[in-house]
Image (cartoon, grey):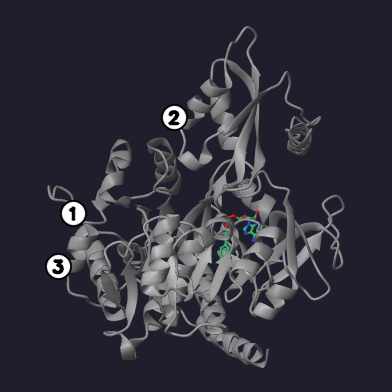
Amino acid sequence: RTEIFNSLVELNERQKILTDRNLDVASCVLSQFPHALAESRIALIDAATNCQISYAHLYRSIRSLAYGLYHAVGVRKGDVVFLVAPNSLLYPTISLAILSVGAILTPANPLNTTLEIAKQVADSGAKLAICAPEELHKLIPTKLPTMLTTKTSDGTLLSAEEFIECFDPIDLPPERPTQTDTAAVLYSSGTTGTSKGVILTHANLISVISLLKWSVSASSSQDDVFLCFIPMFHIYGLAFFVLGLFCSGITTVVMQRFDFQAMLDVIKVHRVNNIPAVPPVILALVKHASNMKCDLSSLRRVGSGAAPLSKEVTDGFREKFPWVELRQGYGLTETCGAASFFALDEDAKAHSGSCGSLLPHFSAKIVDIKTGSPLPPNKEGELWLRSPTIMKGYLRNEEATTATLDPEGWLRTGDLGYFDEDGFLYIVDRIKELIKHNGYQVAPAELEALLLSHPQIVDAAVIPLENEEAGQVPMAYVVKASGSELTENQVIRFIADQVAPYKKVRRVGFISTIPKSAAGKILRKQLISQTQQQLNS
Ligand code: 4UV
């Protein structure tokens, strides 16, 4: 505890310096690279190919690509650059090069469909796209100037990889962004409606870096090996694997996407000791790891975030892997990542089911949903948060911004929870409309709009259905047009054809009317409890 207290004092000092200076986030990351050991210290390892890059190589690559983007492509400060690619060694380089130019990064899920990609490109106002070659077909309809991440044999399009090879690293472009400038626009549905652009400034991302650096260095060393399968387009992956960890000098083994057996192999081969994960991965470890041939002796810590981790799974994990610390964290895209976590394993063990305590520089209050009054410990209400990492607002969406951020800067999280007497946070439910499938966001409003576009559907509501493996799956309630013979499978297929796989509707219930309030709002809680009762009976 003393060590943590001392490191907190240090963090406060650093935070003061960072906010005093006219720093931008890329310069902040690059200035904290472990220069002394840069040539020999490995920053990234590709889990599939074993290709490794050092911190020095990463540093040069970011500078070279930033030079190419600025001088050869003409990307300027404030231009929005759309990035769609799976995790790779190049992903952090490309993201940090975009930020180095002062351009705005808007990353997307590579699982998204052509239509979903077109929406984000249009909404973000992107001027340039950078995509993995296999995603190129999804960008063609947008007519956006496009670069590839890696070289292809036909060589018709320029690639980031070529830029890195052919330009020498030179100083960063002259026009530097300041802390109040937008650095990234990530997409989240917030508390209601469809996906919205979350504006994150350089100051937000710099604060995240100092928090992550603090939390990682409080319990890790430079010899740690982290495993990354959390997608880097999501705030959880972006904060850890594009921004924070490089400032701690550790090595990250990158998997393109999650695969359970491959993960077990990678842990063994690379002696991975630290994994930021999500609840379905923890569950899979509890259920299957002991039946499979694997060596997890190197593991020291597993984190869980992005969705609730049940007490049963937590206890099961501790029983099976007593040498591994399991710590839950909690965060949102709108808070630029983690808002709470456990600094000490003894606290995590003593507060099973909790997401830890607030990170430094965060304030919180629990607010009565009906009266809006702040509540004391152990009383459930909506969690409101305030910190230097809280988003500036939703892109060109004043209404959603004022509904989410109050004039004093408090963010309404849409999560229901409480703090215990010791300041540990428990999230017990979600009062916002969000569904979380394997940690990915699914906005009911988006699926409802698609359902309503079907000629035989007159009304629809989408709710979360609890699911052991994925956390939740979307279930649709549908009111058919009179005389319609529409079947469950037809509805499921209709949606599946238009959305990314994680958004697919998995169950359909036909109903005569959708329950609504006098103001016409869908009574989701009523539908959810009716569904639970039916399933339990
Ligand atoms: O906007 P988003 O998709 O954001 C996230 C971010 C999770 C992170 C990020 C960095 C970390 O270091 C970390 O530990 C976790 O998921 O979704 C935000 C919503 O996800 C739910 C909750 O409803 C948020 O409003 N959620 C996130 N973490 C938890 C959670 C959790 N531990 N328990 C319950 N719900």
Whether residue 240 is visible to the viewer of this picture, yes or no, is yes
Label 1, label 3: how far apart the Cα atoms are:
12 Å
Point out residue 456 in the picture as x, y percentages from the top left corner.
57, 15
Q: CA distance from mark 1 to mark 2?
A: 31 Å
Quadrant of image for the N terminus:
bottom right
Give the amino acid type for the residue marked by disc 3 in the picture. Answer: Cys
Mark 2 → mark 3, Cα distance in angstroms:
41 Å
Q: Identify the residue at image location x=48%, y=69%.
A: 240
Viewer-side residue, 282 vs 170 = 282
Q: Earlier in the sequence, mark 2 or mark 3?
A: 3
Query: Residue drawn at (71%, 61%), measured in percent from left and top?
Result: 311
Which amino acid is tagged 1?
Answer: Leu
Q: Position of residue 224 (x, y in %)?
A: 44, 80
Indicate the position of residue 270 as horizontal and vertical percent values: 37, 73
> What element does badge 1 sit on?
loop
User: Is there CB contact under 8 Å for labels 1 and 2?
Assistant: no
Residue pointed to by mark 2: 497
Specify whether 455 is left or right of 39: right
Residue indicated by mark 1: 158
Q: Toward the viewer: 32 or 153?
A: 153
Relative height, residue 526 to residue 272 (above, below): above
The reply to whether residue 407 is visible in this rendering is no
- Camera-near label (2 vs 3) is 2
- Counting residues from the start of the chain, the first of labels 1 and 3 encountered is 1
Labels 1, 2: front one = 2
Residue corresponding to mark 3: 166
Q: How many marks?
A: 3
* Amino acid type assigned to the residue bearing label 2 in the image: Asp
Please give the name of the residue rendered at 36% of the width and 66% of the height, measured from the top-left corner.
92
